[in-house]
Amino acid sequence: MSGAHLAIRELSAGYQPGIDVVREVTLDLPPGRVTAVVGPNGAGKSTLLKTVFGFLRPRAGQVTLDGRPIHSLGPHRIKGLGVGYVPQGLNLFPQLTVEENLRMGGWTLRRDGRRLRARLDQVYDLFPALRQHRRRPAHELSGGQARMLATAREVVPEPRLLLVDEPTAGLSPALSGQVYEFLATVRRALGTSLLLVDQQIQEALEIADHVVLMDLGRVRAQGPRAEMHLARVRALIQRCLEGVDG
Amino acid sequence: MWLAVSPGLLAQFTLAGLMMGVLYALMALGITFIYGVMKTINWAMGEFYMIGSFVQYLIVSHLLGPDLWWLALPATAASVFVLGMLVQRLLLRPMFVGGVERRDEYATVITIALLLLLRSLAAVINGPYQHTPGSHLPDVTLGPLSVPGAEVAAAVVGVLVLGLFFLLLHRTWPGLALRAAAQNRIGVQTAGVDLLRLDMVAFGIGVSLAAVAGGLLAPVYLVYPTNGAVATTKGFEIIVIGGLGSIWGALVGGLLLGLAEALGSALIAPAYQNAYGFLLLILLLLIRPIGLFGERARVV
């Protein structure tokens, strides 16, 4: 399974009529690459991910996955095309067991029992700590284990593109490090493309191939990590916060 | 006021209470199930009970006859399931698309309007008449106890339906999705579930549970346009006793309400049967306001 090519063209979207939170965004995510979207609060980063996954209908523009338009599809159809979405916070089912959570992750494979079983086994191999807790309810897991389960759940259907929204929001530095290890593991194992939004710029940049800076709904700068290094990104964000254009 | 009750009679009342409790539980289960998945309280639940009792009456009286009442029940459940899905699709689903603010509250208000609509329609169509599908089931003797056959059959089938419901929830993919949706509606969408369709199925299942209760009790109580009002009241009593959103709460609450009413009738006075449930409810609110199985928000 290889990563998918996501193309976003002139995308505008918002929550209220006439007020766009994402404005004419154009981005290209090559297969198997990690793109980190950074920027100050209110830049429209999370809204961009919600729009790509179909939670929000774009007001204008196009989103294509390997050339196929997906901007008018609902989340369940986009998921069926191999796109995963990890929202902010823990996206688990607290009273379901670890195994049931993983099975829900494999919902799109439910008609192929053999493949689903194989995928579950592979996920347990990838995250061995989950195997011993498979019969425990998710709410009994430690913080780190729960984060692992949340990541593992998204891995079950072998996503070709994973949209990850603020994976370290509110986490301790130790847990943040773990989360990025999980994401790196997924990328290595599946070759999944990642579109990552995070306020923890340093950690996001360490994993990224390509960096996009957004402010007030627009893309202000983008480039490979070598160009968009930490010092430059911080300086650019500072300029955004000070209201300096460009 | 207090009656001298023999142990045999007390056992008979207890059994009757438990049997009625099973049917109350069906009703409450439907309410709590719909709330659990959709976060919407369906105030029109009693009207689906009423429709179930009418459908059962019509099929038994005009097509199958009282001996084949059990064959009418799946048809009653299926027809109300389809009706429930239609109602959800046409009246409630618009609240759940397009980012409507406070959609749960709006949806709840719509169910109140639906209650009035269905009850009025039934009154217009049926008029002031009351019906019964009748029953040829003989009384059942359990030791020293003699219980009407229709009540025993209703309780036994009620237990079977509860068993089927639990099998559906715990042994099938839609069941897993329904349990998951009750805990995290964003989560099921990110898993790839079509949540709008799942809501429709959940509503259909919930109201068909009420219809089954109505169908089973049709030969025990009369069938008429407002017979769902009492069922709704008792359903919500049970929800408060057991805890809103709790499946086990609905089951245990239903049995407790049935017992409270039966034992109150036996030991104090049958005239106040409906008051004993309220006494139980008030007592429980004082001791445990979130209900027996109610939980504060549980997060990982």
Image: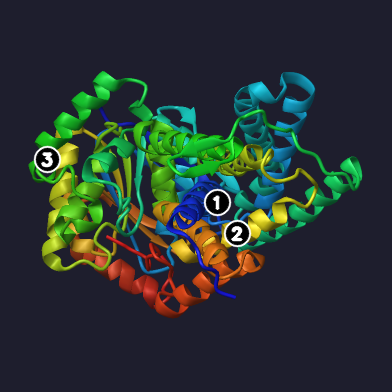
Mark 2: which secondary structure? helix
The residue identified by callout 2 is B234
Provide residue A67's location: percent of width, then percent of height: 45, 27
- Distance Cα–Cα, label 3 vs label 1: 41 Å
Q: Nearer the viewer, mark 2 or mark 3?
A: 2
Query: Crowdedness of circle 1 by 10 Å Cα count: few (<14), some, many (20+)?
Result: many
Say which residue label 1 marks.
Answer: B24
Q: Is residue A10 visible?
A: yes
Asked which secondary structure carries label 1, the reply is: helix
Amino acid type at circle 2 is Lys
Q: Is tag 1's residue or tag 2's residue first in the polypeptide sequence?
A: 1
Looking at the image, which is closer to me, A128 or A37?
A128
From the top left corner, tell me how far across and down residue A219 is, in percent: 42, 56
- Local crowd at mark 3 within 10 Å, few (<14), some, or many (≥20)? some
Q: Residue at x 20, y 31 (%)?
A: A120
Looking at the image, is B28 positioned above or below residue B58?
Answer: below
Proximity of marks 3 and 1: CB atoms separated by less than 8 Å: no
Q: Chain of mark 2?
A: B
Q: Residues within 10 Å of mark 2 (few under 14, many from 20)?
A: many
Q: Are marks 1 and 2 in contact (CB under 8 Å)?
A: yes
The vertical placement of A186 against A229, above or below, is above
Residue at image location 56% in from the left, 69% down from the top: B276
Q: Is residue B21 left or right of residue A234?
A: right
Q: Which residue is mark 3?
A: A131
User: Could you tell whether A149 is left or right of B202 in the image?
Assistant: left
How is the protein colored in the picture? rainbow
Of A239 and B234, the residue lying toward us: B234
- Of all chains, the one bearing label 1 is B
Could you tell me the amino acid type at mark 3? Arg
| Residue B180 x %, y % | 39, 46
